[in-house]
Amino acid sequence: MTLEGRLVDWFRSNRRDLPWRRQRTPYTTWVSEIMLQQTTVDVVVPRFVAFLRRFPDIQSLASAEEEDVVAAWSGLGYYRRARGLRLGARAVVERFGGTIPSDEKDLLSLPGVGPYTAAAIRSLAFDQPAPAIDGNVARVAARLFADDGDVGKAGTRRRLRERLVPHVPEGGAAAFSEALIELGALVCRPKSARCDACPVADLCAARLTGRVATLPVRQPPRRSRPVLSARAWVERGCRVLLVQRPADASLLPGFLELPGRWGPAGENPPDVVREVLENLGFDDVRTYEPVAEARHAITHHRIRSVAVRADVVGAAPGGCRFVPWDEVDLERVTTETRKLLRSREASV
Ligand code: SF4
């Protein structure tokens, strides 16, 4: 029997009974896949059931208030995922009439949907030959094909996906993807692969060449660097000064944020804020005490954000504007600025 045939057969008799498998739709697939990112199956199961009870379909999620969605996400952590899911649901309702698309480009155009989630929805819910390569599936595939590329790299994952695609059985893409996921979870474990219980042991290149213990290859993550992000907190009456990120910025183009910049962790925040405001073209800049602080992390950087109260003279130069507090849309500001502004909400 072929590799795919054995995997699918094995899956049919060994599959775990998970709630998203009982009611497989594009919506339940999307919700469960987002929840399963960075959270274990045991933690996700009860929360998935409760979330589906609260938001049974894309329409109910799209029309929900952000705080209700975040509350229903309680216990899962990484609340950014909940916000992204809600924004994605709204985009589906607005742009696709409430029907989750099956086309890769359309899926990738949705907020919160990256290549993995798009592939998971396509293969699991629409039965398309698009194996979703998460860490578990990458491990299984790297061992099956004895691929010694770094599975942390996009190029390796792309190659593994290309090597899996010819094995996707006609009309059985969903079962094949589920089988790979299940094999990674139950048998082809990271440290203790149970090759003696594996349905494809005699086809597995890593096992046949004695390389199970050394595959997959993964470079250790680079150590993250501490940085200071000093931000200006300039209020005029009931308005706050925000600056718009460039339209061609690689991250959050067009979003608003408190003016500021990154720098070495040891810099003095008021000095940085004065420099930033003067560079923007403001005169007579005065800086005072820090008013808010937040911490977050972006690839390889641990960021300490400090907002420093400041006064300036003159009109806001191009790219900046004073926005009334009650018109600040927290969905259109950067995560960092949202965190800093929320500390104001907490103290008002
Ligand atoms: S034989 Fe071992 S290493 Fe190969 S896929 Fe099966 S469990 Fe994984």
Image (cartoon, rainbow, N blue to C red):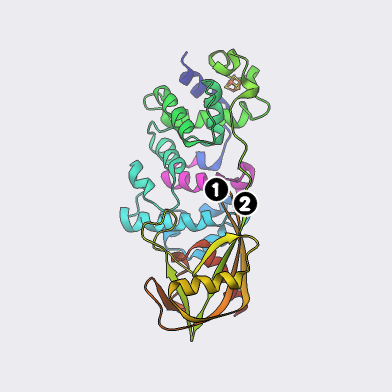
Q: Residues within 10 Å of mark 2 (few under 14, many from 20)?
A: some
SS category of the residue bearing label 1: helix
Q: Can you tell which mark lies on residue 35?
A: 1
Q: Is residue 102 visible?
A: no
Give the dominant element type of the magenta stretch: helix, strand or loop.
helix
Image quadrant of ligand 1 equals top right
Eye-nearest disc, 2 or 1 = 2
Q: Residue sitting at 40 percent across and 38 percent down?
A: 122
Compared to residue 233, the image places residue 153 above or below, namely: above
Residue 5 screen position, x and y as percent: 46, 19
- Which quadrant of the figure has residue 187? top right
Q: Is residue 251 visible?
A: yes
Q: Which residue is mark 2?
A: 225
Compared to residue 100, the image places residue 337 above or below, namely: below
Compared to residue 264, the image places residue 188 above or below, namely: above
CA separation in Å, label 2 and label 1: 28 Å
Q: Which residues are magenta?
A: 22-46
